[in-house]
Image (cartoon, rainbow, N blue to C red):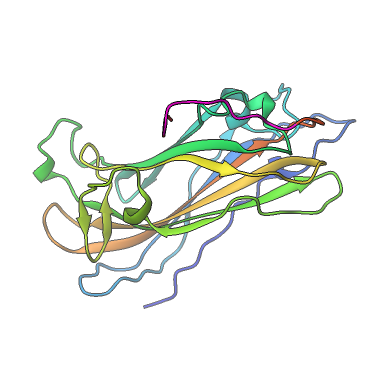
Amino acid sequence: MKKMTVRRPHLPGFRPRSPRLRVVLLAAALVVTGGCGAIEDSLGGSGTPAEAAPLAAPADTDVPFNSEFSRDGTFQSHIPIDEVDFVFTIWSAKTTPRMQEWYPQGDKFFSFTFTGYDTRRRLRDKFATKRRIYLDDVAITSVTTSASGTTESPYNLREKARDVTFDPEAVQSRRYGMLITSPKGAFELRNQRIGTMAADTEGVTLTFTATVHIETGARTGRFETQQVVQTVPISIFKSEVATRPQPVPYNAT
């Protein structure tokens, strides 16, 4: 079995703003990498990566580091692979809801969900007729963009999805992870903290990587391994004051 490889997207939107030129930038890039043949007793995958179409941002924007998430306070992507629609949704948490107040100093919070729809079936078909989709490992990395060219990594996560998802009773497989087939399962993380960064930080880019196992057919017990990668750029606004989280009920999202 060949080794799984991941091709990273080239995102023009990651460059600092030029004072002389306004450029149409890409708000986010979606990359899906394919697994190899069906598996039962071992987990592995390889294949030629498939690249989904990027979502373009509008040309006229007031954010210094072009970001749909920063403009709207939320971002959702649909990533098709093997007739599964993987839906990734991220939003600013209630503790720091105003994106224009995401400054280099202070804590900034976001929440997100990740789920899969078996598009071989209709939405209201019986769940037993749908393929099971499991989320195994989830990893999030970050890198900043600054005026000086220095970089930082203010947020990182690498965990088994079933150990950190908001639902304490998520449907699980000891071998493959937690069920994320809609409507019975979804992965959710709330109030994830991005801490203080350098004063000249202009943006931070989050990269979410999910290892999933997709059943080849409903109740076949055979699965294929895939890797889904979603990149989200976030604007950081220049300020001499710190972002101030507001009090909210415990674990409010």
Front residue (pair 153, 69)? 153
Q: Position of residue 228 (x, y in %)?
A: 43, 53
Q: Main secondary structure of the magenta part?
A: loop
Q: Residue at x 56, y 26 (%)?
A: 73
Quarter of the rendering occupied by the C terminus? top left
Q: Position of residue 245 (x, y in %)?
A: 60, 30
Q: Is residue 203 left or right of residue 31?
A: right
Q: Residue at x 18, y 39 (%)?
A: 121
Q: Residue at x 30, y 45 (%)?
A: 84
Q: Quadrant of residue 99?
A: top right
Is residue 78 in sight in this rendering?
no
Front residue (pair 242, 154)? 242
For the magenta stretch, what is the residue range?
242-250
Quarter of the rendering occupied by the N terminus? bottom left
Q: Is residue 50 left or right of residue 231?
A: left
Q: Any magenta on residue 93?
A: no
Q: Is residue 16 above or below residue 46?
A: above
Q: Is residue 124 above or below residue 187?
A: above
Q: Quadrant of residue 29?
A: top right
Q: Position of residue 209 (x, y in %)?
A: 47, 54
Is residue 177 in sight in this rendering?
yes
Q: Residue at x 71, y 23 (%)?
A: 61
Q: Residue furthest right?
A: 20
Q: Position of residue 14 (x, y in %)?
A: 71, 44
Q: Is residue 128 left or right of residue 150?
A: left
Q: Is residue 68 left or right of residue 158?
A: right
